[in-house]
């Protein structure tokens, strides 16, 4: 190992231990939460957003979180005791999260409508980006997309790279994948079986955890159950079809067209992901989170997720 690499790793682990120590010894303070409505041009006309403004802002761009199907609304990033929004707010980032089309309160508003096609959902995200830019008096927004939300984030970054500062993709399905138990998902997409709901999602989480159940607390399981029931999508056929299509064939975008700085993260136990995405994005950073599943946000290893993403957003050195 070269001396430069040695010192980089030493600095990384020093910072890791410091972060762990802070989480263990100091009380977690929640940033002030604001709920508001942002305008979009789809048939509903507006979307619910959560905003957490830091007490002392840094100079970095605002962060917009886009949720997955498996934690289906903006609140996924602000679960008490597991709030990624609080974590970034404490570091000076202005954080936002929205209900994607057909989910959460957006879903309640659209209960008589069919689920959005990808193009509609991406258009909604692009309009929200413009709204946040105007409210924040900034030229760019950083996108953090998890699962299906990461597909939308990538497509929005391709559509308007001048508005995206950095792109973080967590657990994003990345093409044909034989490891995914597709039958239930295909039935839900075709409308011939029940929605892939709370029990099915937790069952898949447990499958991913096999042998490492101690990495999750009972509180985390209960919080995800409450979240999925609270955020139940009104008509999830669109996103489910998108995911089945990706797992059966390929992504709906060309990863090589992503031209903004990108960090790709995946849990080593997340069978929704194959690891094929990062090599297709020129200059991207590829991080494998050890002992982590698709729901790493609610697992004990989330500290390392926080650390990698914070370093990327702050333009610090990354070590896998």
Image: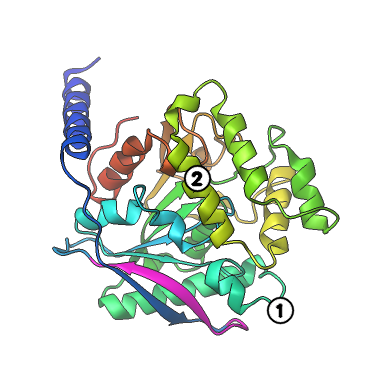
* In contact (CB < 8 Å): disc 1 and disc 2: no
Quadrant housing the N terminus: top left
Can residue 198 be seen in the rendering of this structure?
yes
Residue ID at (18%, 33%): 21
Residue 81, above or below 74: above
Seen at 72% across and 73% down, the residue is 114
Front-lying residue, 253 or 119: 119
Single out the residue that lies furthest toward the left: 56
Q: Where, quadrant-wise, is the C terminus in this rendering?
A: top left
Q: Secondary structure at mark 1?
A: loop
Q: Is residue 244 left or right of residue 47?
A: right
Give the residues in magenta: 42-53
Please tell me which of labels 1 and 2 falls first in the chain.
1
Looking at the picture, how far across and down is residue 234, in whole percent? 66, 68
Name the spot of residue 283 as percent of width and height, x first.
40, 43
- As displayed, is residue 263 above or below residue 167? above
The residue indicated by pointer 2 is 222
Instruction: Give the residue at x 47% y 36%.
Output: 218
| Side of 56 where 82 appears, left or right | right
Residue 252 image offset from top left, x and y in percent: 65, 56
The percent coordinates of residue 233 (x first, y second) are 63, 64
Check disc 2 and report its element: helix, strand or loop. Answer: helix
Task: Look at discs 1 and 2 and give the one toward the viewer.
Answer: 2
Residue 10 appears in which quarter of the rendering? top left
Residue indicated by mark 1:
112
Q: How many marks?
A: 2
Q: CA distance from mark 1 to mark 2?
A: 30 Å
Q: Quadrant of residue 304?
A: top left
In the rendered image, residue 51 lying in the magenta stretch gets the answer: yes
Q: Is residue 57 magenta?
A: no
Can residue 259 be seen? Answer: no
């Amino acid at each position: 190992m070269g001396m430069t690499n040695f010192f980089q790793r030493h600095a990384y682990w020093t910072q890791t231990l410091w972060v762990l120590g802070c989480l263990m010894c100091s009380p977690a303070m929640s940033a002030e939460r604001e709920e508001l409505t942002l305008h979009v041009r789809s048939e509903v006309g507006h979307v619910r957003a959560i905003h957490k403004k830091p007490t002392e802002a840094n100079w970095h761009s605002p962060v917009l979180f886009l949720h997955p199907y498996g934690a289906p609304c903006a609140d996924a990033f602000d679960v008490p005791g597991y709030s990624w929004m609080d974590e970034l707010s404490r570091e000076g980032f202005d954080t936002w999260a929205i209900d994607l089309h057909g989910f959460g309160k957006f879903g309640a508003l659209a209960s008589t409508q069919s689920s959005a096609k990808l193009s509609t959902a991406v258009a909604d995200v692009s309009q929200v980006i413009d709204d946040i830019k105007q409210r924040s008096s900034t030229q760019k927004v950083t996108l953090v997309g998890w699962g299906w939300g990461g597909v939308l984030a990538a497509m929005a970054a391709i559509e308007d790279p001048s508005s995206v500062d950095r792109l973080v993709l967590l657990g994003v399905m990345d093409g044909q994948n034989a490891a995914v138990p597709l039958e239930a998902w295909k039935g839900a997409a075709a409308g011939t079986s029940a929605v892939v709901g709370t029990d099915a999602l937790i069952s898949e989480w447990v499958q991913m955890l096999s042998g490492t159940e101690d990495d999750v607390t009972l509180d985390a399981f209960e919080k995800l159950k409450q979240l999925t029931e609270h955020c139940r999508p009104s008509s999830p056929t669109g996103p489910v079809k998108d995911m089945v299509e990706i797992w059966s064939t390929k992504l709906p975008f060309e990863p090589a067209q992503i031209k903004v700085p990108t960090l790709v993260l995946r849990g080593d136990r997340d069978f929704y992901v194959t690891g094929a995405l990062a090599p297709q994005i020129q200059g991207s950073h590829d991080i494998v989170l050890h002992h982590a599943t698709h729901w790493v946000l609610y697992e004990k290893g989330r500290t390392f997720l926080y650390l990698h993403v914070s370093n990327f957003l702050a333009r610090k050195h990354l070590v896998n």
